[in-house]
Amino acid sequence: PEARRVRRILKRQKRSLKAEKDGISEVARALAREHTLLAFDEFVVTDVVDALMMRQLFEIMFRQGVVMVATSNTAPEDLYKGGLNYDYFRPFLETLHKHNNSFDMNSTVDYRLGRALRGEDRYLTPLSPQTRQRMDALFAQLTAGQTVGPREVPVAFGRSLKVPACSKSVCRFDFETLCGDREPVMGVTDFQALCRHFDIILIDNVPVLEG
């Protein structure tokens, strides 16, 4: 809950354009007074405002004795790598390494795919009523016992992405929705958001792609 609170605070700061150092300092000290431990799932830095605010926020909280535990799909040294004004963010990476130990949880086995996705189920062709039925059956198998329906996932800059059908870890799209030219056209940040929120993405009606 407190990690979500921090994210909401940062989002409000960005929207109100009041990300001054003093404002972030007040937030950091208030959190440090209330908590000694903060846990973040899928720690990520998406833009320059996030980068600068997070540096200020966590440097102060670390000095106040707050401990942070986080998971991330990105190694600490690669956070915001190559981003705008990266040099201003880089000292924060040194602070992270000073206060946190990094553990690589990489594995050659992706256990998320073991439930249903055999080799022949990862690409169903040609398009036909039969392959549609197989896709329906696969989606039902992957989401068995879970709540399934539409959902909105946060992207960046206060924007969200509508997912037409999904469970907690599996989503399903039509190719035209993901890669077509109908508004709103999806971009890199949208695809990154999908990858952060879902383990498996099913795509219907992929056409013949020509160069």
Image (spheres, rainbow, N blue to C red):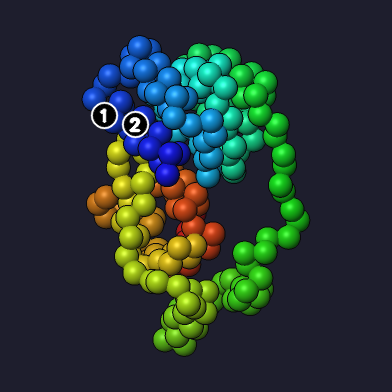
Q: Quadrant of the N terminus?
A: top left
77 on left or right of 57: right
Q: Could you say which disc has been placed on residue 142 in the image? A: none
Badge 1 element: helix
The residue nearer to you, when weighing 114 against 13, is: 13
Between circles 2 and 1, the one closer to the viewer is 2
Q: Is residue 2 above or below residue 93?
A: below
According to the picture, the residue beneath numbered tag 1 turns out to be: 15
Q: Is residue 183 above or below residue 20?
A: below
Task: Examine the image and state in which quarter residue 13 appears.
Answer: top left
Q: Residues within 10 Å of mark 2 (few under 14, many from 20)?
A: some
x, y (%) of residue 146? Answer: 45, 73
x, y (%) of residue 74? Answer: 60, 38
73 on left or right of 195: right
In the current view of this chain or complex, which residue is farthest to the right? 108
The residue nearer to you, when weighing 10 against 84, is: 10
What residue appears at the point 52 percent right and 74 percent down from the top-left corner? 142
According to the picture, the residue beneath numbered tag 2 turns out to be: 9
Q: Is residue 108 visible?
A: yes
Q: Amino acid at mark 1?
A: Arg
What residue appears at the point 72 percent right and 39 percent down from the top-left corner? 103
What residue appears at the point 56 percent right and 16 percent down from the top-left corner? 63
Q: Is residue 105 above or below residue 56?
A: below
x, y (%) of residue 21? Answer: 38, 12
- Marks 2/1: CA distance? 10 Å
- Say if mark 2 contacts mark 1, CB within 8 Å: no
